[in-house]
Image: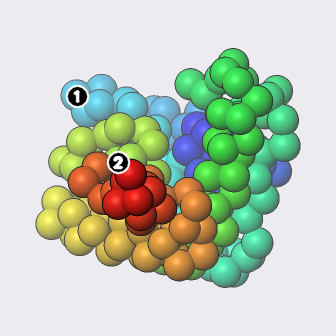
Amino acid sequence: MVRTAYQITGNPADAQDVAQAVFLKVWQGLSQFDPARNFDTWLYRVTVNAAIDALRSRGARAHLVPLQGPDELPAGESADGSPEQRIDGERLQRAFLHLAARLAPRQRAVFVLREMEGLPTDEIASILGVTESTVRNHLLQARRALREGLEREYPDLVPRAVNQEDPAEESDEGRS
């Protein structure tokens, strides 16, 4: 819950506040939960809605804060690896947070649930209470905005296309 809330709000303190509020809402609403439904989907729905509310309450364009150290990495991420890999990961996370601040809250939520949490489109639609085509549309728009922002503002973080060759290499080969 904290990781999902953080990826949507972009602020560790807000994510912790959201998680605390979600635990309270879930505890208070547990008697109303339909056991025939998926608990994880319900939990995601409460978390995402609370994170979006927190995001909206401080303004959709609020400054997003990167996580500071290995002790604060979201679950599933590791501080292992070379220093270069950690630096690249931190730069990519800062770039994502900077660019995600420009996404509409629902676009950000869809992107986080699909690309970071790995949830299928139908489950995201259920969590957000929208159609699958709306999820696909939000995801398409979020990916496009993030890709364009990366290309424009962080070109060194954009992987080169497999068939795209380095112009410097071509000129060196031509001189051989």
Residue at figure coordinates x 48%, y 72% from the top left: 151
- Image coordinates of residue 163 in percent, x first then y, are 24, 54
**Among all residues in the image, which is located at the extreme front?**
176
Instruction: Say if residue 54 shows up in the picture.
Output: no
Instruction: Say if residue 94 shows up in the picture.
Output: yes
Q: Residue 114 shows which numbered tag?
A: 2
- The crowding category of the residue bearing disc 2, from other C-alpha atoms within 10 Å (few below 14, some 14 to 19, many at least 20), is some
Q: Quadrant of residue 169?
A: bottom left
Q: Nearer the viewer, residue 111 or 160?
A: 160
Residue at figure coordinates x 35%, y 38% from the top left: 118
**Dot 1: element:** loop
Instruction: Tell whether 166 sits left or right of 73.
Output: left
**Among all residues in the image, which is located at the extreme top?**
80
The residue pinned by badge 1 equals 36
- Image coordinates of residue 54 in percent, x first then y, are 67, 65
Kind of residue indicated by mark 2: Arg
Number of numbered discs visible in the structure rendering: 2
Rendered-image quadrant of the N terminus? top right
Q: Earlier in the sequence, mark 2 or mark 1?
A: 1
Q: Residue 155 shows which numbered tag?
A: none
Q: Nearer the viewer, residue 162 or 8?
A: 162
Q: Please name which of the two marks, 2 or 1, marks the residue nearer to the observer.
A: 2
Q: Nearer the viewer, residue 76 or 20?
A: 76
Q: Quadrant of residue 101?
A: bottom right
